[in-house]
Amino acid sequence: MISRFFRQYRDAYRGLPAPVWLLGAVMLINRSGTMVLPYLTLYLTQHLHYSVTEAGLVMAVYGAGALAGTFLGGKLSDRFGFYPIQFLSLLTAGFFLIFLQVAEQLYAMCAVVFVYTLLGDAFRPAVSSAVAYYSTPENRTRAYSLNRLAINLGWSLGGGLGGYLAAIDYRLLFWVDGITCIVAALVLRAYLPLPGQSTTSLPEVEGVNAKTGSPYRDTLFLLFTVATTLFAIGFWQLFSLFPLYLKQFLQLNESRIGLLMTMNGLMIAFTEMPLIYNLEKRYAHLKPRIIASGVALVGFSYVLLNLGFSPILAVVCVFFNTLGEMLAMPFMQSFTVERANSHNRGQYLALYSMAYAVAQITGPALGSQVVAWGGFPLLWVLVLGLCLTSAGGFWWISGRVKPVISETV
């Protein structure tokens, strides 16, 4: 039994091309310094003494910049290639992160945050296009899972360390986050092979939606994007208002909040790849239904917080939230790539990423207004409703797409 477990764990990582591993290393370096985002609401309310509503406004501007950046990144990736967009996005975002600490007035903060996310989030569709290019149809979902593993392992390291640095001086977060972005850009430029120099690039096959060319004319994918947005609004609360809930209602300090963020990242780092490996072997034709199950689980995880004011419930919430995330997000990305072809892949992935950017705009703003009016218990119930609606949408989509069963691991 034990030997079988370790054999499956090993097999989950076998067969991935070297550039995919290098992209994972770049993400690990970058995300190991991700400290500003999970503590931004705390920085704004505790250090700069913003109101909850003002902090929600800044987070909404953060999302607006992300929305514009992902759209721009997708367009530029299809036109100029993903390689230069990745490099320039990481490099410029690093310098703006360092500069962010000098903005203290509300409007100045909003302006710098918008430019930072405009530049930084152009990276999302570019790196997703790179993962698709350097992987193959047989290992694409696992390639995305490896990328998420690196993101979340880095997130767990950065989130945990960030809690301790925030307890010393919040400004340290901006320096570490910015410097790791710059280092990640330099590593990518130095070691990632240029497109055309890799022997493991994705075969340029026509996607299931090749005739329309544009994701904005793909009705089914637009519905998929709406369902993703509803889910992302709920999921985003984990990194925007959930830390504030832990601080104000459970009286947890920044270090303990950081440990909870670390738990999320470590769960993904150690369990997602074997989970995806086994699910793809058995249920590759049921991707939208797997997504629906994960989305519903995320919604129910928040409602657990209404059972009482206990740190144990917060731990259980993070556990089930993370499990739902692992079931949903890797298959969302592979579904998106399956709808695209080599000429519009960046735009499809940009539209998918824009769903999360819209959630970054509406999620914190809506959530902060709900908390101000009816408190956190009402917010958690509302999030459950959004996630169940989203899960229903994915389940409906599952009956209207032809299963792609060629991507077995």
Image (cartoon, helix red, strand yellow):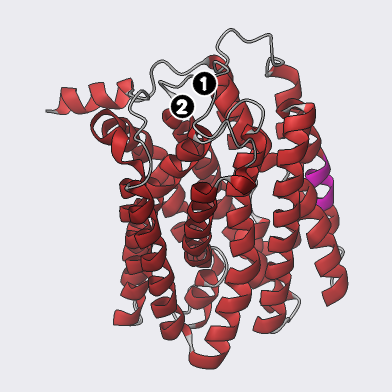
SS at badge 2:
helix
Quadrant including the C terminus: top left
Quadrant including the N terminus: top left
Q: Is residue 94 magenta?
A: yes
Question: Can you tell which quarter of the image residue 202 is in?
Answer: top right
Residue type of the residue flagged with mark 1:
Ser
Mark nearer the N terminus (2 vs 1):
1
Identify the residue position indicated by label 1 in the image.
Answer: 135
Which of 210/55 is in front? 210
Which of 270/335 is in front? 335
Which of 35/13 is in front? 13
Question: Can you tell which quarter of the image residue 201 is in?
Answer: top right
For label 2, the crowd category at 10 Å Cα-Cα, with few meaning under 14, some 14 to 19 and many 20 or more, is many
Residue at image point 61% right, 46% down: 217
SS at badge 1:
loop
Q: Decide if residue 26 is in sight here.
A: no
For the record, the magenta segment spans 92-97
Residue type of the residue flagged with mark 2:
Arg
Where is residue 282 shown, x and y percent of the image? 23, 32
Identify the residue position indicated by label 2 in the image.
Answer: 140
Left or right of 50? Residue 142 is left
Where is residue 24 shown, x and y percent of the image? 56, 30
Q: Decide if residue 395 is in sight here.
A: yes
Q: Is residue 123 above or below residue 389?
A: above
Residue at image point 58% right, 56% down: 356
Residue at image point 48% right, 62% down: 235
